[in-house]
Amino acid sequence: MSRQKIRKLPEAIIVGARKSGTRALLKFLEINPYVSPARSEIHFFDKPQNYKLGLDWYRNKMPMCYEDNLTVEKSPAYFVTKGVPEKIKQMNPNIKLILVLRDPVKRLISDFSQLIANRIKAANEESDNYQHSGDYRVSNDTAKELWEKAKQEFKTYVLRRDGGIDDRRSAIKTGMYSTHLERWLFQFNLSQIHVVDGETLTKNPYEELNRLERFLSLKPVIKPEHFVYNQQKGFFCISPSGIPRGGSVNHPNGTSLCLSRSKGRRHVQVDKNLANKLSRFYEPYNDYLYSIIGRRFDWTIY
Ligand code: A3P
């Protein structure tokens, strides 16, 4: 008898944090055939216009899967958006929550670099619109100039006039992880929240994926040989033996599967003193985070 496929509300959600490796985590988790990931970020709980469409709308955004598969969604904005933990609890108080956290200074630089990369992309698109031939792009020199200017812009972005860190900036606030986590702990037990170290995920994905499989009570299927380091990309990719079968990815046989170019992109250069200052700013938030979760991370990068 053939088994029926259904759509289920997610039983686990990657709630954040933005630019910490959330896509890599979900892509790698999919190596496990019992995992059915939503293809895109749904933003059900953080965007009121989506939330008002109700749980049936949300369920319809989930993939078709077998009853015993685990449906997983990721929307990193959930972590920092007020009211989201309450809404998720209302849907399922026993849900499993996954939080990827990375050195907050690196996260901030990544977030800001995305802004610059998007600006260059928009400039490219604009120049294409104006050119009949369509082959004119923002020159390398212009892109270089924009990255150079971004160095100064980053400084103005993160510092107040008096030289202190501007903690009103949302990109700065995102990295104050313990502050956000506290809000989640009003609604959920710590045992329901699994924290993934984004730095280890980058250097040794197997270690974090193995822990995650155990947290999700999945049969541990993911192996070290499912990952292969790609020199050119500078990150781990999924080796041919780990690529999920069955329609989820359209990928040439025999090659490894890396994340798209927007993951692992160029970063704005940050002056060492400023990076140190940011590290010191985040230190008390990190220490508090470690005391909450009972695990320390080696985030002393600068
Ligand atoms: P950068 O692009 O700044 O390097 P998110 O998916 O949450 O937006 O996170 C993006 C970050 O994931 C990337 O930031 C990159 O550092 C990190 N990452 C971790 N493992 C990766 C991998 N295997 N391939 C690409 N990016 C990875």
Image (cartoon, rainbow, N blue to C red):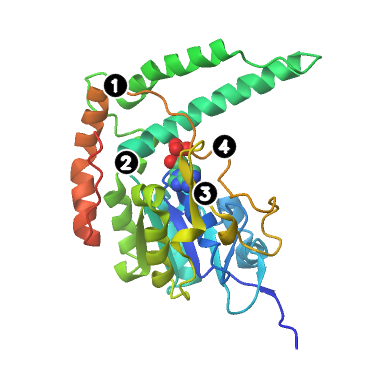
For the residue marked with disc 2, what is the amino acid?
Pro
For the residue marked with disc 1, what is the amino acid?
Asp
Instruction: Report the Cα–Cα distance between label 2 and label 1.
Output: 16 Å
Q: Residue sitting at 25 percent across and 32 percent down?
A: 278
Left or right of residue 5: residue 217 = left
Q: Is ligand 1 less than 8 Å from the beta carbon at label 4? A: no
Q: Position of residue 68 (x, y in %)?
A: 58, 79
Q: Is residue 18 visible?
A: no
Q: Residue sitting at 49 percent across and 51 percent down?
A: 228
Q: Which residue is mark 4?
A: 261
Q: Quadrant of residue 290?
A: bottom left
Q: Residue sitting at 29 percent across and 21 percent down?
A: 271
Q: Which residue is mark 1?
A: 271
Q: Nearer the viewer, mark 3 or mark 1?
A: 3
Instruction: Report the Cα–Cα distance between label 3 and label 1.
Output: 30 Å
Instruction: Report the Cα–Cα distance between label 4 and label 1.
Output: 25 Å
Q: Residue furthest bottom?
A: 1
Q: In the rendered image of this protein, does residue 201 appear above or below residue 150?
A: below
